[in-house]
Image (spheres, helix red, strand yellow):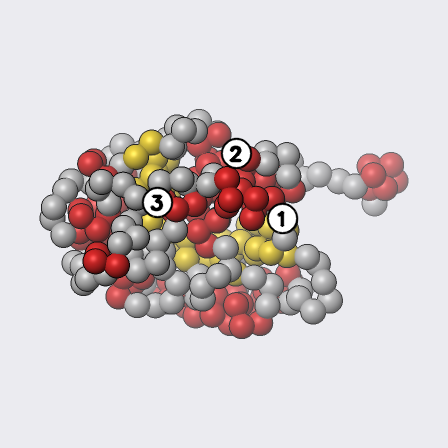
Amino acid sequence: MARIIVITSGKGGVGKTTTAINLGASLNKLNKDIVILDANLNTPNVGLQLGAPIVPVTLNHVLKGKATIEEAIYEHSSGMKIIPSSLSVKELTKFNTKKLAGITKELAKNFDFVIIDSAAGFGDEVMAVLSAADEIIIVTNPEMPAVTDALKAVKVARNLGKEVNGVVVTRHVNAKYEMPLSSIKSMLEAQIIGVVPEDKSVKEALNLRDAVVHTHPRSKVSRKYDEIARKVSGEEVEVRRGFLERIFGL
């Protein structure tokens, strides 16, 4: 059975979809069989960011009972699977989001990991997605508004009895105006499993319609996502020490 991991945040624009895509791509590089489910039904981006903005069958069709979940699975050139949601305005109708739990359980029979990209906030579709999760990863930026909203997400997850696997801090530049990582960890009462730096390669990957770990595998941000994937999969992660640490044992 797969591990069902929801990638969520309290607010939009913090790098949630980028994290879902690159975590999935990095797990795929570790020879894990993964599927990325775009459960952001109103503003989906997974298909768009991976070069499949318009497909014949989407999650929307499955939720309406017009297709099976198997018909909505597409294979990326890397080998990982994705289930996009529709970009069509005509598809912006109410769905039976309670079906999401059954869909994820069905997917769990055939994959090692089901990575779900959730919408931001705490609407009905988000609550349905969180309820279907085994584990939850919270994404935030190192800014007070984003961390405050991330705290709400942590509390909502725990109220549902869900395990918060960890926090990923994105767009980190180590500036004085940013919240210290120690303060973020203390405020959210959750471990930080990855700190992803601000990196222009992320935007370049968006233009190339692919995961940054594919387009810029040697970039700092790609190495961070690979590291997060190893942590999530349970592999030991080697801590890289600086030059002075190696020489003087600092």
Q: Nearer the viewer, residue 58 or 140?
A: 58
Q: Circle 3 is placed at which residue position?
A: 53
What amino acid type is highlighted by mark number 3?
Answer: Pro
Q: Is residue 220 above or below residue 90?
A: above
Packing grade of label 1 (10 A; few <14, some 14-19, many >=20) is: few
Gap in angstroms between the C-alphas marked 3 and 2:
19 Å
Q: Residue 142 in the image: x percent, y percent? A: 60, 63
Q: Residue 236 in the image: x percent, y percent? A: 57, 35
Q: Nearer the viewer, residue 118 or 231?
A: 118
What amino acid type is highlighted by mark number 2?
Answer: His
Q: Residue 114 in the image: x percent, y percent? A: 34, 42
Q: Secondary structure at mark 2?
A: helix
Packing grade of label 3 (10 A; few <14, some 14-19, many >=20) is: some
Q: Are marks 3 and 1 in contact (CB under 8 Å)?
A: no
Q: Is residue 63 left or right of residue 131?
A: left
Q: Is residue 16 above or below residue 228?
A: below
Q: Which of the marked residues, 2 or 1, is nearer the chain's N terminus?
A: 1
Query: Which of label 3 and label 2 is nearer to you?
Result: 3
Quadrant in the picture for residue 144: bottom right
Q: Which of the marked residues, 3 or 1, is nearer the chain's N terminus?
A: 3
What amino acid type is highlighted by mark number 1?
Answer: Lys
| Quadrant for the C terminus in the image | top right
Q: Is residue 164 left or right of residue 199?
A: left
Q: Circle 2 is placed at which residue position?
A: 214
